[in-house]
Image (tube, rainbow, N blue to C red):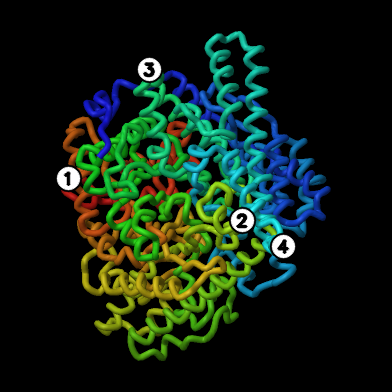
Amino acid sequence: MIQLIPEIEKDVSLQKYGFNTSPLLQELKTELQNAKSEVCIERAVLMTNYLKVHEADSVPMQRAGAVRYYLANRKAQFLDRSLLAGNSTSKVLGAPVYPEFLGLSIWPELETISTRKANPQYLSKADADTLNFEVYPYWMDKTILELTRAEKNPAPLKLMEMMVYFLNGKASVISHTTPFYGEVLSKGINGIIREAEAKITALQGSNANDQILFYQSVQTALQGIIDYAQNLAKAAAIESGKTKDAKQKQNLLEIQKICEKVPANPPTTFREAANAILLCHIGVLAENANMAINPGRLDQLLYPFFKNDFDKGILSIQDALEITGCLLLKIGDNTNLVPETSEQLFGGAGSVPAVTLGGIDSEGASAINDMTYILLRAVELLEIRDPNVNARYHPLNGEIYRKRVSEVIVNTKAIPAFYNDETCIDTLENQGVKTEDARDYAIIGCVELGSAGREYSSSSSILLNLTAAMDLALYNGRRPYITGDQIISFPSGDPAKFQNFGEFKDAFYKQLEWLLTQAIDLNEIFGHMYQKYLPTPLLSGLFQGPMESGKDLIFGGAKYNSSGVTHIGFADVTDSLNSIQYVLDNKMATLGEIVQAVQDNFSSKAEKDIQNKLKAAPKYGTEDSMAVQNSKELVQFLYQAYQARTNYRGGKYRPAFWTMTNHAGLGKIGWALPSGHNANTVFSSGITPSSQNTQNLTAAFNAVGMLESRHIPGGYALNIKYSPLTSSTDKDKFVTQFSNLVAGYFMNKGMQVQFNIYSYDDLKKAKKNPEKYPNLLVRVSGYSAYFKDLNEAMQDELITRTQYDIFTQQAVPLT
C-alpha cells in the first residue's frame, strides 16, 4: 500500500484547496462552460489537401502522412491561460469534422446547423463554403460507409440505416479504446520512433514488406505529434514577447521549455508529464474520431512524477491540483459533430473520454495514492461533463477512500461512477486476460472494461435494439408500424397458434439470433474495409502489441482484441417475457389476444384490461423467481451467442448493457410492448430496472447483482437516483449510508453503479427553466451530460427514473 503524504492523509478531501486558492481553474472552467460549440474544419481541410496530392501512396503511408501533415500545419495557438499547451481543435469548444467517417452527415445542414433549436453548433459562412465546395466533394465516394456500399453493398447495411434495429460504430469511428501513454512517459516519442527504426533494420532483406511499411507509417504519424509540440513551443516564445501580463509571460516561457522537450523525450517533471499526455491525446484525436478515446488511469500515470517533484520541494499540492485541473479541462475541450437527425439518439453527449481512478495495481496491491485524491478534488471542483470520471473500488482500498468517492458524488450530484474491482477483474480474467493485465483495467467511454493500453476492444462496435427482436417475434418476422406487412427477418410462427410461453420464447430467441447475426456480419465487413482503407498507425504506436507484432491495431496487432455489443431495452424485453409468461400461465388471456392488444397500443377497453394484467406481472428489478430467471436467461443467451463468434482481429464479441440516450430516442419512435409499455414512450436505460417498477432499492441492487457478471464482459450501466440532501439532513450520515450501500451491492457481485442525486421536482424545474440551470450535470447511461442539452425524451426519462430515499431505501412516489 502506498503511503500518502501527511497533509493528504490528514484530510483526503483537500477542502482547503478550492477556487479561492485556484482562481485560474475557476476562470478556465467558466470559459469552457460558457463556450458555444463550434464546428472546426481545420483537420478536414488539411487532411483533404494532403490526400488530394498523395493518392498514389500506399494506404498506410497515405494515412500516416495526412495525420502528420495536419498536426504539423494546424495553427499553434493559446485559447486560454491554461498551464498546459495544446487544443483538440481550433475552437475553445470544438466539434471537429472527420470526413472519412460521418463528417458529411451535416452537408444538408450547413446553412442551419448554427441556428437549429437542439444543440446548435456554430459554423461560419466561410467555413461552410469551404466544406461545401472544397472538402465534401472530394469525400463523396470515399467515406467508409460509401466505400462499403460500393464494394460490398451488404444487406445488413440497409437494416442499419433504418436506425431502429442496430447501429454499427465502425460507420463513424475508430475509437472506444485506451492508448498506452505510459510508454511515452518512459521512452518519449523519439524512443518509440527509434524502436520502429530498429525493427525496420532487422527486417531488411526479408519478405516482411508489410511489417516494414507498418513501422514506417508509425514513425511518420508519431512525428506529427513532435512537430505540433515544436510549433507550440515557437508560438509560446512569440506570445511571451507580446504579453504585458508578467504571470502569463512566465507561463508561456515555461510552456515553451516543456514543448521543446516533451513528448519527444521522456518527461522528468509533473507538469511535463501532464502536458506529454495531453499532446499524445490530441495526436490520437488527429487520427481517430473524438469518441471515447480514453486517457486511462491518470492517477497511476502521474503519481511517480508528483512524488518525485513533491519530495524535491518543487511541486505543491496546490500546483498539482491546478495542473491536474488544466489537464481535465483540456481533455474536455471538444465534442462531437452531431447532425440534427441524430439528436434524438445522441443529443447531449460529449466525446466521453474516460478517466479511471483507484482500484488495485497489477500486483494486486491497493493503487490509491496522492494523485487519486488530488484528481478527486479536481473533479469535485470542476463538475464538467467530460472527461467521464470513474472510480474503481477494491476492499483493499479501504473505507476512507470509498467514503471520499461517495462524498464527491454527493457534492457533484452525478460524478464519478463506481466500479467493483473484484467483479470487473474476474470478468476480464474469464475473457482470457492475464491477471496482471486484468488488474490494470481502465474504463472505456461509458462503462466498458479493457486492459489499459493492451486491449483494442472497439467496445462500441454494435448498438443493438432488443425490442426489435421482440417485435419480430410478436409479428412473425415483421414490424408493422415501421414497414407494414413486409417480412424483415423470417417467419418464426404466428403467436396466435403457439400453445404456451415456451414456444413464444423460442421464437423470440430465434429472431434475436437472426438480428445479432446481421449486426455482426456488417461489423465484420466494416472491419475488413478498415483494413483496406483506414489503418491507424499513430494509435498503434501508442499501444502494447503492434510494435512487437509489426501489425496495425485493425489487423489484430494488440495484445488483446475484442468487439463490444451493447443492448437497448434490456428491462423492457425482460419484463415483456415476464408479462407474457405470467398472463399465459394464469390463463388471463391468449397469446393472440396479447399480440393484438399490443399491436393496437392497448386502445380498447378490453385491451386496456389486458394491459393491466400484463403490468401486474413480476418485474425485473425485484427478486421474484420468474423475473430473475428470465433476466438471467437473456443475459446467458446473448453471452453464448456472441462468444461463439470470432471477430476479424481474432478476438471475441463481448455483450454489454449501456444505452447512452438511445433508449430514449428509440423508445419515442418505438411501439407498445407486452410489458404493458405504451407506444412512443422511452425504454429503460442500461441494465437499470424500468422506472417506477422497483419500489425497494435493495431489491433493485440484488436483481442486478444476481446477473452473472462474467456473462457481461463489455460492462453495464446501472442508474440509481437518490433524494437530495435537505437542510435537515446530516450530510456525514448521508455519505456514510451512501458508501455502505455501494459496499453491500459490491459484496453481492454488482459490477458498476452511477448516481443522480436530484428529486423529481428538481429536474422538472430544470426542464421548465433551462436558463436557470445551465450547468446542471446528470448521469445518463454511462456518461455525464448537461441536462439542458438533452432532448425532451431523455429529460423526461431522467425525471421519471425511480427516486429512492437513501435511508428508508424505498421509492419516493412520482409526483
At x 44%, y 31%, the residue is 772
Alpha-carbon distance for marks 2 and 4? 12 Å
Horizontal side of 329 relative to 403 (left or right) equals: right
Distance of mark 2 from mark 1, alpha carbons?
A: 44 Å
- Give the residue pinned by disc 2: 172
CA separation, marks 1 and 3? 35 Å
Quarter of the image holding residue 381?
top left
- Amino acid type, mark 1: Phe
Q: Residue at x 34, y 22 (%)?
A: 17
Is mark 2 in CB contact (under 8 Å) with mark 1? no
| Amino acid beneath label 2 | Ser
Q: Mark 1 or 3, which is nearer the eye?
A: 3
Which is more N-terminal, label 4 or label 1? 4
Tag on residue 146? 4
Residue 807: image tag: 1
Question: Residue 746 in the image: x percent, y percent?
Answer: 24, 54
Mark drawn on residue 21: 3
Question: Label 4 amino acid?
Answer: Glu
Marks 3 and 4 in Cβ contact (< 8 Å): no
Q: Is residue 726 left or right of residue 258?
A: left
